[in-house]
Image: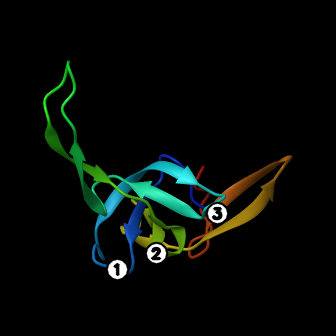
Amino acid sequence: MRIKKGDTVVVITGKDKGKTGEILKAMPKENKVIVEGVNIQTKHQKQTRTAKAEIKHVEGPIDASNVMFYDAKAKEAVKIGYKIDGDKKVRINKKTGNVID
């Protein structure tokens, strides 16, 4: 996966197509990500001794192939590549060649 926690991404397909948000959690083994404000699901919370019953709205996971990195400078979705910079492997914007990290 070329995207990681904290990246800003745009959804490119599905019911939330066009929405932009920050990655809250990345799950590389399942190839899924949880994006802030995308794929909102309803969860019913049972009543306990200390908390009342309520309906919660939480973000569900979506496939990592359905999101693309959003470059704030270019204001568009871009592909990510890798380049060796000295001893470090850094992520780059494939269109402009600028370093992301």
Q: Is residue 75 above or below residue 7?
A: below
Q: Which residue is mark 1?
A: 14
Q: Residue visible at 22% across and 26% down?
A: 48
The dot on residue 39 is none
The answer to which of marks 1 and 3 sits earlier in the sequence is: 3
- Mark 2–mark 1 contact, CB under 8 Å? yes
Q: Position of residue 39 (x, y in %)?
A: 31, 63
How much space separates mark 3 and mark 2, taking CA atoms?
12 Å
How much space separates mark 1 and mark 3, taking CA atoms?
19 Å
Of residues 44 and 81, the one nearer the viewer is 44
Residue 80, by quadrant, is bottom right
- Mark 3–mark 2 contact, CB under 8 Å? no
Q: Residue visible at 14% across and 40% down?
A: 54
Indicate the secondary structure of the residue bearing disc 1: loop
In the image, what residue type sits under mark 1?
Gly
Q: Position of residue 78 (x, y in %)?
A: 50, 73
Q: Is residue 47 above or below residue 94?
A: above
**Residue sitting farthest toward the bottom:** 13
**98 horizontally vs 45: left or right:** right
In the image, what residue type sits under mark 2?
Asn
Q: Position of residue 16 (x, y in %)?
A: 28, 72
Q: Residue visible at 33% across and 52% down?
A: 36
Single out the mark in the foreground, 1 or 3.
Answer: 1
The answer to which of marks 3 and 2 sits earlier in the sequence is: 3
Of residues 51 and 35, the one nearer the viewer is 51
Q: Which residue is mark 3?
A: 1
Q: Position of residue 38 (x, y in %)?
A: 30, 61
The dot on residue 66 is 2
Indicate the secondary structure of the residue bearing disc 3: loop
Image quadrant in which the N terminus is located: bottom right
